[in-house]
Every structure is written in structure tokens, then in C-alpha cells.
Image (tube, rainbow, N blue to C red):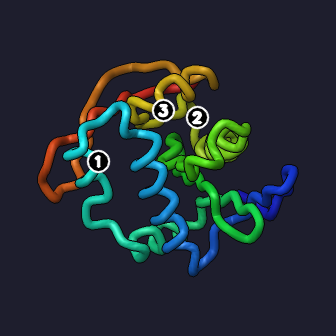
Amino acid sequence: MAGDRHSGGVVLRPARAGDGAALYDVTRRSVEALARSHYSPEQLSGWMGDRTAATYEAVIAGGRTVVAEENGAVVGFVDAEPGEVTRLFLLPEAAGRGLGRQLLDLGIEAARRDHAGPIRIEATLNAQSFYERHGFRAVKKGHFSHGVGGDPIEIVVMEMA
């Protein structure tokens, strides 16, 4: 994922060391606000598992994460590996403005590098319709557990040709 791109008042740039706390916060706040209508309070409370800002620093070190920054603050991010968009999260107040689509496009572009074949994503129930609108189709249901106990989180495995 290349250099900085500007879109309106938003800068899309490669994540850099030190962004881990912001990515952690975006994920936590996104889950709390955007997923609550699809998951139980118990599932939401255990969602972050044992993740910390350091968890996201390790993701950033992989070199495949792009952040959306507005007024100097990270408001969303995407990361990918060959064949899969692995994470896409937005702050609740950044949702609904087309920013998710921009990040998804960057994630798909990165996932296609060094990969021939369908692109996969494990979507949360609240995000399934977003991915369907952008060309993904559900292939099976599954569950995700963060390994710290609690109720597993239902997901939808989706693919795009």
C-alpha cells in the first residue's frame, strides 16, 4: 500500500510505528457502536480479547495497513494479506461518508498483490451488507473466538472473484 492519498479532508496513508493505540481505539469504538445491534453485551465485552496497542503495532510492522486520518486523527484503517482483507474498521462518526469504500478498495488492491483467485473477508454480521454492496458474496457462516473465553462471535466468510 503506497504513499499518502488525499480525499476531501481525509488523508489515506500507510500506518506507521506509533499508530497502534489509535488502531486499537478505532477498533474498540467501532465494535462498541456499530456491532451492538447484532451481538450480545457478553460478546461485545470480550471482543477485544487480550489485544493491546502493541497488538496493532505488530500488525503495522507487517507493512500492509493503511489509515484514514482526518484533522490529524486516525478515523479508520484497513489491512490485508495476499488473498484476504483482514481488518477494516471506522470510527462510528466516520461511517456513512464513503470512507469505508475507499479503504476497502485499498484493501482489495493489496490483497490481490501476489495472489490470483478470490479475495476473502471474514465479515461481522453488522458489516455483511456493506461487503455485499461492494461485490462480496457469502460462502459460509462461521465463528470467531478471541481465545479468552466468552461467547464466540458469529461471522460470515465472504469472497469476491
Q: Residue at x 12, y 54 (%)?
A: 149
Disc 2 residue crowd, few under 14, some 14–19, many 20+, Cα 10 Å: few
Vertical position of residue 138 compared to residue 124: above or below: above
Q: Where residue 35 appears, x then y in whole percent? A: 40, 39
Q: Nearer the viewer, mark 1 or mark 3?
A: 1
x and y, in percent, of residue 126 in the image:
43, 31
Sooner in the amino-acid sequence: mark 2 or mark 1: 1
Query: Mark 1 or mark 3: which comes first in sequence?
Result: 1
Q: Is residue 131 visible?
A: yes
Residue beneath disc 2: 116
Which of the image's four quarters has the C terminus?
A: top right
Cα distance, mark 3 to mark 2? 25 Å
- At a point 56% along the width and 47% down the height, the residue shown is 92
Q: CA distance from mark 2 to mark 1?
A: 35 Å
Which three-letter amino acid code belongs to the residue tagged 2?
Ala
* Residue at 19% from the left image edge and 46% from the top image edge: 42
Q: Is residue 135 left or right of residue 155?
A: right
**Residue 113 visible in the picture:** no
Of callouts 3 and 2, which one flags the residue occurring earlier in the amino acid sequence? Answer: 2
Q: Nearer the viewer, residue 10 or 67?
A: 10
To which residue does mark 1 refer?
Answer: 44
Spot occupied by residue 52 in the image (x, y as percentages of width and height): 36, 72
Residue at the image point whose x is 14% and y is 49% from the top: 150
**Please, what is the three-letter code of the amino acid marked with disc 3?**
Ala
Give the residue number, with chain letter if any, for mark 3: 127
